[in-house]
Amino acid sequence: MSKLDNNPFAPLERSEKVSLGIEKSGITFWKDVWRRFKKNKAGIVGISIILLFGILALIGPLMVPYSFDEIDLKSTYIHPCLTHWFGTDHLGRDIWAEIWIGARVSLLIGIISALSQMVIGIIIGSISGICGGKIDMLIMRAVDILIAVPFLIWVSLFMLVLKPGIQSIILAFSITEWKGMARLVRGEVLRLKETEYVLASKGMGASTWRLIRKHFFPNILPLAIVSVTFQITAAIFGEAFLSYIGLGIQPPLTSWGVLISAGISEMRYYPYMLFIPAIFISLTMLSLQLIGDALRDATDPKLRQ
Amino acid sequence: MLKYIINRVLITILTMFVLATITFFLLRLVPGDPMAGPKVTPEVKAILRKHYGLDKPLMEQYFIYMGNLMHGDFGWSMAARGNRVNDIIKNAFPVSLDLGIRSMIVAIVLGLFFGIIAALNRGKPMDYLTVILVLIGISVPSFVIAAFLQYFFGVYLHILPVARYDTFKHTLLPTFALSLGTMATLARYMRASMLEVMMEDYIKTAKAKGLRRFQIVWRHQIRNALFPILTILGPSIAMVLTGSFVIETVFAIPGLGRFYVTAMQNLDYTLVIGLTLFFGFFLVIMNLLVDFAYGLIDPRIRHMRG
């Protein structure tokens, strides 16, 4: 006791022991999310399937001695068998190789366009929410116009102007599909602006940049990531639709959309050509849906026990 | 309320104007020529270009187009020569509308039904079955579903026609294929909404009063759970409309969606602009109506002045 009385307000010295002790008791937000995500079986199944498809997209085409664009007119329409695991199509191309090259294209389009939509949406939405006034009104009118027409119409219009290909599809999705994210971010910024801790932070002289970095961004990120998983499915579907109507990926390159539309025209006599790509695209969309649902539950503070 | 309506209508007009301008200039950027064809000689092409006014300066074309648009005239189709865009819309819209209304009815009735059943049997087999159905409906793309239906009922069982849109039998597969996605979304929202309402105090009160289960579910739970569902009706209409592009193409139904897809493949400028504007206009009006309906039903909005 006497020791304490000597210097009651002496600062506690920073030692490794003290900081370690603090680190142990605390848990970061993302660790907590992962802890809760792990408990969701459906989410784990989803993420395993996506990882498996991702790996197979990288190594799958190398596992067979055929190239995806190798035309062999002597072995057309072979049903799935030991030499051709998923059979061959009307030009004798190996469908296993085509599926995984298609997976590369479809997943790439889905992920990159969802991420670029997220970045554009966060930037525009934050500008709209933080600046307010006329800028906000202008941006919101632009969003209204984009929303007035379904995204497939916008994307097809842009695809008419651009040269068909992976880059154009990603570009078309990015220009037209940031509206949802921008709205979400704007609403969240407006809500956060009213909270007491942001007011307190402002009262202590925090700059707008600091508010963005310390308060807005960390709060928006979980919402944005959840919505990105759903945007990936939208982009994969969009690509399939564009390829189906002939505005998407052009041969010799392939994608799941291209394979499905080829399958639809051949389904009468060679139904495996439709079923195989259809199963892969559906499983992917399902997995992303499960991951999105699990992430939403895991990041929602209301559900935290 | 009146001020709100006028404001909304003005924004709608502005939206349509900007939409028309964007689509007009966007399509002039498209590489390729709607008049191209093996039998079209340069002389014929020049005559055609003159006929459609494509020889005039771009700005003049724009003002002529917008002037005609003010009178509700979308001009002549460039690929389906001799047809006015207005006539194409007039002929194709009833087909699309018919398919759309059928699908909306099926989606709403079955979607709400499955949502209610799942919520009432929470955690039981019926609930899991619904959740699986919902996941399939959300994750399988509509043209895959359409193709499967064609294969199973048309090619394999031989009981339903796989193309055209003439008799009631023709409508069955497209209606189901088009409604599945919306049905799944509605079922999902309805289930969540029912479960949320179940926790409310007035349900407890109703139980305490000793009402029969049917009365509690019907009078209190379902009625209140339906309310948030109204907000997703607007997006559902858009979903059905977009879905119709695919479904009409797969089933060869002569509706607006199929014309839109072929117009894009043929670079039919006027038809593409006309249909884009028509779709935009239709959706904006629909959303306006849904908003007003929402305002009429919700007493909090109904009694708001300003």
Image (tube, rainbow, N blue to C red):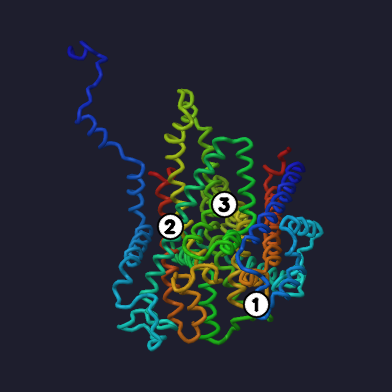
User: How many labels sit on residues?
Assistant: 3
Residue under label 3: B210
Q: Amino acid at mark 2?
A: Ile
- On what subunit does the disc labeled 1 rest? B
Residue under label 2: A111
Judge whether B102 appears above or below A233 on screen. Answer: below
In depth, the one of A164 and B142 nearer the eye is A164
Residue under label 1: B37
Residue B104 seen in this snapshot: yes
Horizontally, residue A36 falls left or right of residue A269, namely left
Q: Residue at x 62, y 60 (%)?
A: B29
The alpha-carbon separation of the residues under discs 1 and 2 comes to 39 Å
Q: Secondary structure at mark 2?
A: helix
Mark 2 nearby-residue class (10 Å; few <14, some 14–19, many ≥20) = some
Are both tags, 1 and 2, on one chain? no
Find residue B293 and report its horizontal and vertical position in percent.
Answer: 70, 52
Find residue A88 and report its horizontal and vertical position in percent.
Answer: 39, 82
Q: Secondary structure at mark 3?
A: loop
